[in-house]
Image: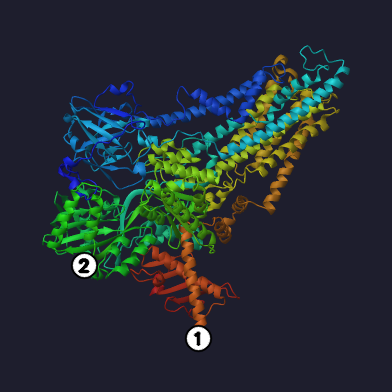
Amino acid sequence: MAGGRIRARLKRSSLYTFGCIRPPRESIDEPHQFQGPGFSRYVCCNQPGIHRKKPLKYCTNYISTTKYNVITFLPKALFEQFRRVANLYFLLAATLSLTPVSPFSAYSMIAPLMFVIGLSMAKEAVENWHRFMQDMKVNMRKVLVHSGDGVFVTKPWMKLEVGDVVKVEKDHFFPADLLFLSSSYEDGICYVETMNLDGETNLKVKRSLEVTLPLDDDHAFKDFKATIKCEDPNPNLYTFVGNFEYDCQMYPLDPSQILLRDSKLRNTSHAYGVVIFSGHDSKVMQNATKPPSKRSTIEKQMDKIIYILFTLLVLISLISSIGFAIKTKYQMPSWWYIPHDNQGLYDPNRPLLSGFSHLITALILYGYLIPISLYVSIEVVKVLQALFINQDIHMYDEETCTPAQARTSNLNEELGMVDTILSDKTGTLTCNQMDFLKCSIAGIPYGTRSSEVELAAASQMAMDLDGPDHDHEFSRIGAQSGSEIELEIVPTPKGVSSKSQIKGFSFEDNRLMNGNWAREPYKDVILLFFRILALCHTAIPELNEEAGTFNYEAESPDEGAFLVAAREFGFEYCKRTQSSIFVREKHVSSHEPNEREFKLLNILDFTSKRKRMSVIVQDETGQILLLCKGADSIIFDRLSKNGRLFEEATRKHLNEYAEAGLRTLAFAYRKLDTSEYSSWNDEFMKAKTSIGGDRDSMLEHLSDTMEKDLILVGATAVEDKLQQGVPQCIDKLAQAGLKLWVLTGDKMETAINIGFACSLLRHGMKQICITTNVDMVAPASNTVTKENILMQITNASRMVNLEKDPHAAFALIIDGKTLTYALEEDLKHQFLNLAIDCASVICCRVSPKQKALVTRLVKEGTGKTTLAIGDGANDVGMIQEADIGVGISGVEGMQAVMASDFAIAQFRFLERLLVVHGHWCYKRIAQMICYFFYKNIAFGLTLFYFEAFTGFSGQSVYDDWYMLLFNVVLTSLPVISLGVFEQDVSSEICLQFPALYQQGPRNLFFDWYRIFGWMGNGLYCSLIVFFLNIIIFYEQAFRSNGQTADMAVVGTVMFTCVIYSVNCQIALTMSHFTWIQHFLIGFSIITWHIFLILYGMLSPSLSGNVYKIFLEALSPAPIYWLSILLVAVACNLPYLAHISFQRSFNPMDHHVIQEIKYYKKDVEDRHMWRREKSKARQKTKIGFSARVDAKIRHLSLTTHKEEEEEESLQHIEGRRPHPEKGFRLPDFRLQVLVHNLLILIAYSMYVRNNLQLFEVHMLGFVVLRSSYTSDCMLFFSFSFLRLHMLFEDHEHDVVYPCYNPNLDWKLMKPIVGMKFESGMSESFNS
């Protein structure tokens, strides 16, 4: 509380240079003059009831992201169902079944349709209910609202109205768009975090109007009345125009007084505001789009198949009706046994009418070509698949107790067809947590801990050397050497740091800790470095009474990490007043910390244009110092001649830190004379209090004047903590062939740093930065700007196309202002073509609307499946626009989750969601649909053959109940089990062989070749079922008393053959059997026989021609059972021959893996298993695997050049290596390979540079190195390679001593026969 009171008394505006200075009262701008459309909003503040009736009635603060409501559910849900072509057809057929021309009873057509439609609508209702409940969680959030007489009461957000005065407390979200009135700071300043809107992590400073500053407590609002006239609701987050009328005075409003919904109040105990825009009028909701109705690619293609089948249906119906008309005209008059037709359905005198009537009959009769139960079976399967996704323990986040959630099951198979991922950055890839990791002071690097990128790369190297089975070996080595880093590669790699429990501080180096810095060579420079950490900021300290330490309320996470680091180094920032900063410094010479006061003279605050921040302080000796931190490029340009002593070494360290994915800042200082400072300060204060358009430029010029002739102190490396497993996940997705775009509201420098951290960028990758000149802002310059952007895009495209290096990689980086032009109609296709040619794309400073537009461009321009993933309200448009939207249920609200199709807790779970569940769901749904069409063609065409065989009479060979049960009961359960449980490979194999995922984007299991193949199989099966049974039973006795088969017997036998054949077919189709599949296939066949027995036992009035047909006619006849066996074998023989041929001569990837696993070659032949795994990676230019490959290529090329130079030199000098002085491997390429392997191990040590002894047991390497060496080529002074001789006749191990390759790359004579086993490092070292 004490800290809170101190903070409340501060006038924070005096600390800032640019943003918060309040001009004198007499110089306040004139009110805005506006009228006409677009500016009709009129808000009466603190006057409840006025906005409850027209004309001032505005929308409530209730929000809804649901697809349906109580009124619209029935019409919209029915529309969704009958958008499906098959359902529309069956509705028509059900209607026609009520007419006399129907070959079936009406119930057999209407009942299945009602069941299918009802089940699908019930599923939609349940999913919509879940969305509604999540909406209500937001709508029921609480906020303090003024109820009158200065009393604030708690109300849910949904009850807020325009004009209400609300009190928002610290770390709470703003419930609507508010006009900021006052805060706990007496000069009306508050801090706002807009990460949920634009992705930026640094806090924004908002200021209230001076006239509302007295409204600083609850009681002050007792008689408060005011009006606001402003712009109408619009989606522009960064603009606002309006006037505030109070006490008969008009005051202009601008965006600095507006607090937007879903932004958060930070570093301020409370703030008062009045509601301007509520609910769907708020700017964040204006940026949202209506929940779209999404359909998967397979479902769209399925409609085309149904069109084909419907065309086939019409064709055979026309053939049937023409045949019937011909027979009616020419043959029916001679059929004396046919009674006279009173309805004209078969009148020989009107054959055309009879043919048309028969066409309707045929359309209904052959309707079984189109499976009515297909959609409902798919719905059931997708719901069960979604249940498995929800229950996957590998996608359960233990920290937040959050499981994965499939919020809609319509898009399960689309997860397996994704081509491009569009991702937000903050909160999605990163945790918004900065960790101080390394630093360079006086040209000396400090910090031995490795970044997540380095650890991921080292793990990949170890994995590449001898497969993932030794990953845990690699992890144990690190643990034994003092690094408690655990690496788990399967199913999802994750790095867990357990050594440092201090949030924001992961630094490890005893040379600086515990006062040891005083023994370093440049201790004075180190002291200054620590003071810059503790003084150069605008944070507020708050005492944590439980821990006895201070917590810091900082504007950015970087600043907070610096203060935590200063505290851990012994320089604890403890107190701040209006004019002073107090730091407790702990030196080795004194046991107790000394509290030092530094007078704070000026703050030159950070802006994105300046890219630096400075404070001017006066120490206890009276010395005035300017302390500066900023981007290295900016700081280095401002160094004095004598301030560049450590520049070269610092630049090298900064490059290394950037390669490791760390965010860097350079530190510098300058000593000021009192007279020099006084004269500058007079001009500065004069400019600071001036009014006019050139105020900011004057302040910037004066700041530039002061921030020059600096002396370099050092640099920091802060890790923007990625979410757990992000680099590994991106690497795996890249290996699966997926492209990743990052769309962020952050500035370009931050986005590039994260790009390096995620391995989307790497050194050696050519960056294409497309930007707009900031001076081109006039409307007249739009044409010039567009021409400039087009020229940049054209030149970049030409550069990419002319690149001949196959390993060259390009990264496209573009900012939001440029993107505005690039997304216009005449530029967007050129921009998209360039982006597709680049390995990675990063869009910076983009608005929520631009995220959605980019997503739409990629989706429509490429025609491939897109997935958008984000965690904030600013990602909603992107998530809804993409084919698949994934929301991360983080700490920044639930807007992204509510708009998403799938929700996960961490980005790393996306790997399993796509590579495992997406792969499985795609193959399951594809095989299931193909099988459905196969079995219905096999069944439906037998009706056509029978009708043709019986004179196109329209007679069905099957009983009505057979037809009814075929799709709904007798063949539905096995196909559902196929769609739910089928696995071509296990989840572990999916993750180890990520290239298997490409079967989905390439649509290998649902292309037209495979679809027509299954249709052809159905056609063949129908021919075998019908004609083989006709041949067997035609004019032949099948019962012991010599009776021949009638229509009921033939129909029942044919139906039984169909049931057996299609169930055997699905058994051949399955790759993965559980007891459930065995049971359901057997159950379907047994159920048919049980039904036949029970149905035949009913009264003849109910069972008709099948009365006791099984017990008395079929089961005693051997020919019945033999025909079933013969037909089932004949139907499935071609498919069996096809898959046997394919597996033997043209196997697919999963076939090879299945064979290896079946014969356990993955255990017996590890070399082959590793070889197959290495093939199962798509060639990629992003991810840490690509970074490792690029490093190896670079080192190999360097080595090769050195070898060639040495050989050339030896050739010129006529020298040859003497046999006694050296030994050359028989093959030069093998020699280079050995060298590269040694370098690889050394580089692995480089990225885990806290190790003193490094062993890789599977290769028998022992590498010794000296401490704190930064050059990876000097990491081993002496190495031993255990190499099994594979050439000549040797069957023994050889140990090659290899000297440092930078000093001498001559391999010494081998010591033959000396056995060296891993784990013998101690004895061998001695």
**Viewed as shown, does residue 1167 lie left or right of 630?**
right
Q: Residue furthest bottom?
A: 1214
**Mark 2 and 1 residues: CB-CB less than 8 Å, in contact?**
no
Q: Residue 567 sits in which quadrant? A: bottom left
Q: Residue furthest right?
A: 334
**Viewed as shown, does residue 299 lie left or right of 157?**
right
Residue underneath mark 1? 1220
Q: Percent position (x, y) of residue 1249?
A: 36, 65
Label 2 sits on what residue type? Lys
Label 1 sits on what residue type? Glu
SS state under label 2:
helix
Q: Residue furthest left?
A: 621
The answer to whether one can see residue 1216 in this image is no
The mark lying in front, picked from 2 and 1, is 2
SS state under label 1:
loop
The answer to whether one can see residue 1008 in this image is yes
Q: Percent position (x, y) of residue 651?
A: 33, 66
Give the color scheme: rainbow, by chain, secondary structure or one colour: rainbow
Between the residue at mark 2 and the residue at mark 1, the CA separation in whole angstroms equals 52 Å
Residue underneath mark 2? 523
| Sequence-first tag of 2 and 1 | 2
Quarter that holds the N terminus: top left
Q: Residues within 10 Å of mark 2 (few under 14, many from 20)?
A: some
Quarter that holds the C terminus: bottom left
Q: Residues within 10 Å of mark 1 (few under 14, many from 20)?
A: few
Looking at the image, is 1276 positioned above or below residue 635? below
Looking at the image, is 672 positioned above or below residue 1202? above
Residue at 37 percent across and 64 percent down: it is 656
Please give the count of numbered marks on the rendered protein. Answer: 2
Q: Percent position (x, y) of residue 126?
A: 47, 28
Q: Percent position (x, y) of residue 1057?
A: 73, 32
Q: Residue 7 sits in which quadrant? A: top left
